[in-house]
Image (cartoon, grey):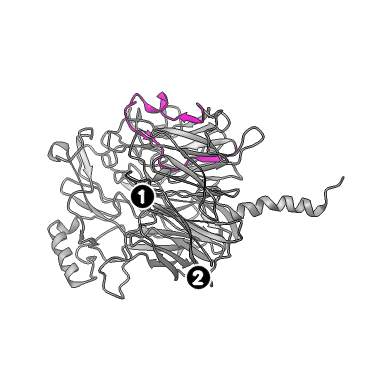
């Protein structure tokens, strides 16, 4: 019997439609564009959005860290993770609980509920799986339909990530995962969260690939290269041995078509003191591209040499095409906390817009190795303030605030900022941005029809010190002789308002086809600011999502407002006050009821919205 042509066409189209309706990975697609092709909700009707349903994540009588979790929506189920090592499957249209699972928890330092989960559709040998990692160094695989651990994966559904070759003999040191693993074909990739201030030696930040059928290790990439490996020559002496850090603590991305995995690596330890690690410290603060199936290095680009600012590279790499000189170039966007966006050919690693090594200030810490230059893209420009000149850059929002800031910074020699990459010092220096960054793990989103890379940022800064430990009573005993501490000492703000000219928070759209800023607006509001003055505000944690309806959805701002903007113009179209800050990226999906939903984790509550 022949299969009718209509049936064949329907069967081919169905998976595509399903992918459009779902949100199967934290970035929506492997390239991390965070773009939903749904357009039922658009610029003309977004003002009509109303609450749909909500889910309370906090359990009674239990401390709770605000959730940073980005949910997944696949095959008619919405999957959500939250502290402490809890995962639930919910009915996407109602919030009804389909199943619940709680993993083991020994550490009460769980950060942001794994930030997300990973989904594997399975194959002929295995059923679909939900995967997540924990701060206790365990990787779980659950049956996506039942929530029960998969017995064939590791030890009854759990892989112990704290293996001897990773722990380096530091078995008592913390090691785990704060963000989701990443799935490609039959492999799951894991990064790591290692503690920054336990000295330079500790567990390795290596990236590993595991077999999704068995949980067995397939390959390991040494993020601090060993003798004979490319990049090892950048290490001087034996500083590389048992070096901790250079870890992926945020999100991987991939060019699934070409089989390339992109790793955004953080700094090596310690964050502000590098006397015992001279040299540029590869592959720290780098985007590293490897063959996803073998772990073999293809190329790398280091965005910060010898990091002394904890700038990491937490912003997830994003795949997009750049049309330049009539040619379409497959590109990847890479960024550290200081918001310099490097747009590179994702196949070769070559810059699409020129990159210059520019001189940066040298510090005076005894024995420290300072890189004489740092890389800067010619395009696009920095997205936040990287320098401060006293008194020209003093905030002038109100006369009282201006006077107080002049007095405060006047006592500190104007803050002693010397431009981008100002090093910390014993007397203190205003560093911009500081450790929390101008941007962070939540990253950006993309609109493929406009070619716009969109990201929220904060113009942050703080007076940072690096002092001998015996003169700093607050320094932890495990720190090195010199200890950097940007916080807990005099702040460069008065009554919560920064002392530099606003905007203090921004939402920016970059046209990747030209490298220019398409639009940039103050983002967020600050309490007490005079009416009519748009200063923007701190908005670190939480990022944007874009949709084919021409919209950007984002929480993030500490004014507890969830907003929608016109992607083309940056005009705010809709907003709603939430009880807590949405420190997570929203997602969108189509329910079986034919309604498009917008969903976001806001503090302890998971919220959804739809058209009436």
Dominant SS type (magenta): loop
- Tell me: residue 190, above or below residue 390: above
Q: Position of residue 239 (x, y in %)?
A: 32, 30
The tag on residue 66 is 1
The tag on residue 100 is none
Q: Residues within 10 Å of mark 1 (few under 14, many from 20)?
A: many
The tag on residue 48 is 2
Q: Quadrant of residue 305?
A: top left
Q: Nearer the viewer, residue 64 or 566?
A: 64
Q: Which residues are magenta?
A: 156-185
Residue furthest to the right = 1
Q: Residues within 10 Å of mark 2 (few under 14, many from 20)?
A: few
Query: Residue at image x 34%, y 26%?
Result: 171
Task: Find the distance from the CA under tag 2 to the CA under tag 1.
Answer: 28 Å
Q: Position of residue 504 (x, y in %)?
A: 31, 63
Q: Position of residue 272 (x, y in %)?
A: 27, 42
């Amino acid at each position: 019997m022949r299969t009718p042509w209509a049936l064949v066409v329907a069967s081919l189209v169905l998976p595509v439609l399903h992918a459009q309706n779902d949100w199967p990975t934290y970035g929506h697609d492997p390239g991390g564009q965070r773009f939903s092709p749904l357009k039922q909700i658009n610029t003309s009707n977004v003002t009509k959005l109303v609450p749909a349903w909500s889910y309370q994540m906090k359990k009674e009588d239990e401390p709770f860290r605000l959730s940073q979790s980005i949910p997944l929506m696949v095959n008619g189920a919405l999957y959500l993770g939250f502290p402490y090592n809890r995962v639930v499957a919910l009915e996407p249209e109602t919030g009804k609980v389909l199943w619940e699972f709680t993993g083991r928890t020994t550490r009460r330092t769980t950060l942001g509920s794994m930030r997300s989960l990973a989904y594997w559709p399975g194959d002929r040998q295995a059923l679909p799986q939900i995967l997540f990692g924990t701060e206790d160094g365990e990787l779980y695989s659950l049956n996506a339909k039942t929530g029960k651990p998969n017995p064939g994966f590791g030890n009854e559904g759990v892989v112990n990530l704290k293996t001897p070759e990773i722990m380096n003999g530091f078995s008592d040191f913390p090691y785990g995962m704060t963000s989701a693993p990443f799935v490609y074909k039959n492999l799951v990739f894991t990064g790591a969260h290692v503690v920054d201030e336990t000295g330079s030696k500790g567990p390795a930040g290596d990236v590993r690939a595991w077999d999704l059928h068995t949980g067995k290790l397939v390959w390991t990439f040494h993020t601090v290269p060993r003798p004979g490996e490319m990049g090892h020559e950048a290490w001087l002496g034996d500083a590389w041995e048992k070096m901790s850090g250079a870890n992926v603590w945020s999100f991987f991305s991939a060019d699934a078509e070409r089989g390339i995995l992109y790793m955004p690596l953080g700094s090596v330890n310690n964050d502000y003191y590098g006397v015992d690690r001279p040299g540029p410290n590869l592959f720290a603060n780098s985007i590293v591209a490897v063959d996803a199936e073998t772990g073999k290095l293809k190329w790398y680009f280091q965005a910060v040499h010898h990091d002394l600012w904890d700038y990491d590279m937490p912003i997830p790499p994003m795949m997009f095409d750049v049309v330049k000189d009539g040619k379409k170039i497959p590109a990847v966007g890479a960024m550290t906390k200081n918001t310099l966006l490097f747009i590179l050919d994702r196949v070769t690693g070559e810059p699409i817009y020129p990159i210059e090594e520019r001189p940066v200030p040298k510090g005076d810490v005894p024995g420290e190795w300072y890189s004489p230059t740092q890389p800067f893209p010619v395009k696009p420009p920095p997205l936040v303030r990287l320098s401060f000149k006293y008194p020209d850059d003093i905030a002038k929002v109100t006369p009282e605030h201006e006077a107080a800031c002049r007095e405060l910074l006047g006592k500190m020699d104007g803050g002693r900022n010397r431009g981008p990459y100002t090093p910390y010092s014993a007397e203190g220096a205003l560093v911009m941005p500081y450790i929390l960054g101008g941007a962070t793990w939540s990253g950006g989103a993309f609109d493929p029809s406009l070619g716009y890379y969109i990201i929220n940022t904060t113009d942050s800064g703080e007076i940072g010190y690096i002092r001998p430990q015996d003169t700093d009573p607050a320094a932890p005993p495990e720190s090195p002789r010199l200890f950097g501490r940007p916080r807990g000492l005099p702040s460069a703000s008065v009554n919560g308002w920064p002392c530099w000219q606003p905007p203090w928070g921004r939402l920016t759209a970059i046209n990747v086809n030209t490298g220019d800023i398409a639009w940039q607006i103050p983002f967020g509001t600050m309490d007490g600011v005079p009416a009519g003055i748009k200063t923007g505000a701190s908005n670190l944690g939480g990022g944007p999502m874009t949709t084919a309806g021409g919209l950007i959805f984002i929480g993030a701002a500490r004014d507890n407002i969830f907003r929608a903007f016109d992607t083309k113009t940056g005009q705010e179209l809709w907003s709603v006050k939430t009880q807590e800050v949405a420190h997570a990226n929203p997602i969108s999906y189509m329910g079986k009821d034919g309604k498009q939903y917008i969903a976001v984790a806001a503090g302890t509550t998971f919220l959804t919205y739809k058209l009436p």
